[in-house]
Amino acid sequence: MTQAPTPLTDEEITARLHDLPGWTREGNEITRSFGIRYHGGVAMIVHVADVERLIGHHADIDLRWDRLRFAITTHDAGHRLSDADFDLARRIDQIAAAHGAQPI
């Protein structure tokens, strides 16, 4: 049996957000939006999904005509934030840059 991830404290979350400009805390999620046209957003989602599958951690994704929004939390930690969320956020930032997505 695997152990559930350890939720971060508010102080730990604040420190990690400091290192991830553009990501904001909304309750027990971190979120970020990017400006990207629809078909570019679809390609970016596929890229993110491939990485998510490999690391076993997933974001909620909202695709609109001209923007893409990610919301991340750790379901296995009681829908609280863990290190895995910030690791995924960093990976999403790298993927967004590779796809030419613009921070909103």
Image (spheres, rainbow, N blue to C red):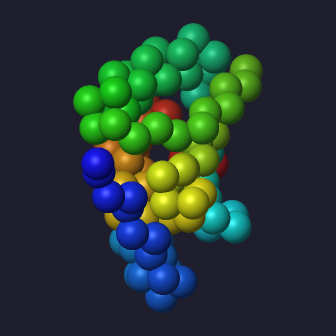
Instruction: Identify the residue at the far right of this view.
Output: 65
Q: Residue at x 58, y 28 (%)?
A: 36
Image x and y of residue 1, in percent: 29, 48
Is residue 25 at least partly visible in the picture? Answer: yes
Q: Residue at x 26, y 30 (%)?
A: 54
Image x and y of residue 94, in percent: 32, 42
Image x and y of residue 23, in percent: 53, 60
Vertical side of 100 occupied by 18: above or below? below
Instruction: Identify the residue at the far top of this view.
Output: 39
Q: Residue at x 63, y 16 (%)?
A: 38
Snapshot quadrant of residue 56: top left
Q: Residue at x 41, y 25 (%)?
A: 49
Taking 57 as reference, is 63 left or right?
Answer: right
Q: From the viewer's side, name the closer residue of 55 and 14.
A: 55
Taking 52 as reference, is 62 left or right?
Answer: right
Is residue 21 at least partly visible in the picture? Answer: no
Vertical side of 45 occupied by 29: above or below? below
Label count reads 0
Vertical side of 10 occupied by 31: above or below? above
Image x and y of residue 48, in percent: 40, 29
Vertical side of 45 occupied by 12: above or below? below
Q: From the viewer's side, name the closer residue of 20 and 77.
A: 77
Instruction: Identify the residue at the far bottom of this view.
Output: 11
Snapshot quadrant of residue 57: top left
Q: From the viewer's side, name the closer residue of 103 and 89.
A: 89
